[in-house]
Image: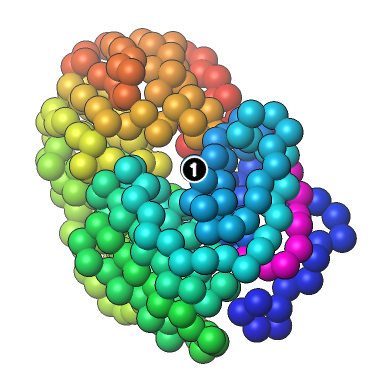
Amino acid sequence: AGIRGLLPPRRALDCANSGTTTRLLAGVVAAHPFSARFEGDASLSRRPMNRIAEPLTYMGAKFDFEHGDGLPMTVHGADLRSIDWDTYASSAQVKSAILLAGLVSEVEVRVTEKSPSRDHTERMLRAMGADVETDGNQVCLRPARRLSPIEIDVPADPSSAAFFVALASLAGGGELTLTDVCLNPTRTGFLEAITRMGAQVDKTASARSGGEEIGSLRVRPAPLRSTRITEAEVPSLIDELPLLACIAAGAGVDLEITGAAELRVKESDRISAVVQNLRAVGADAEELPDGLRVHASRRELSGMIDPRGDHRI
């Protein structure tokens, strides 16, 4: 259909539980000459959408919210203008919404972040021929009239691989190999953190697809030690932070996470959920305003937990 060839939707766009779907598609819709209503489940409807509405409104789109700044929301598209936007945070979803809005509108957009967030969008667009330039924590997309089709092998998700890395690291013996995992440097923060804790993880790159590096992970059990996660590291392992807290509790070591207030506005308040559930199974954990602490303990862990309908919990 071409870069700007979508037709007005006949009914509301149901994004279910996916914040990525909502925010990226809002950037695409904002650059089309029609309106679309976005809906989601109860969890997604509580998540903040003003973070994309603000830059896209500045570009010329209009947003209507029925309750606060969550879903349902209606996006009224328009001919958008160029933007040079500082997010004052690190959010791949906000960045991608702006990039896709610029792509569809054929205007130049520039996004500056506090620190670089995951860059799957930039890599894929670049592989398809778009003029995307990255300089540290800033990315610029220049107008493109078309994208070239490419064949993509979708690699295994590093956030899902993290659970197997955790199990293998805490195991009593043996060795585990995970194949065809995405090794994008903006997604390997968990591997760097658990390696700093003493885990034995070997990475071997083997291929590239859609601009992404793909390879294997070999994991062997090892005694783990305490560590701290600071704000600069958070964007590269935001989804794995709940798991990292569980690893620390299981290994009986200290862990402190700060600069991760974003965890409070995910599918659940993941700071509260992780701490309360760790306490429920006997671990020593406490909440911080922007993170949490797990204290070293040798207790046997068991009990009943409430995952709060959140796939990361």
Q: Which residue is mark 1?
A: 51
- Residue 3: x, y in percent? 61, 79
Q: Give the answer, above or below, for where 152 lies relative to 67.
A: below
Crowding near pointer 1: few (<14 within 10 Å), some, many (20+)?
some
Residue 143 vs residue 231, the one in the foreground: 143
Q: Is residue 14 visible?
A: no
Q: Residue at x 43, y 86 (%)?
A: 129
Camera-side residue of 56 and 16: 56
Tell me: residue 193, above or below residue 131.
above
Q: Is residue 276 magenta?
A: no
Residue ID at (68%, 68%): 32
Residue drawn at 68 percent across, 60 percent down: 77
Q: Which residues are magenta?
A: 31-42
Residue 303 coordinates in the image, percent (x, y): 47, 13
Residue at horizontal 32%, vertical 32%?
Answer: 260
The amino acid at mark 1 is: Arg
> On the rendered structure, is 199 left or right of 99?
left
* Residue 51 visible in the snapshot: yes
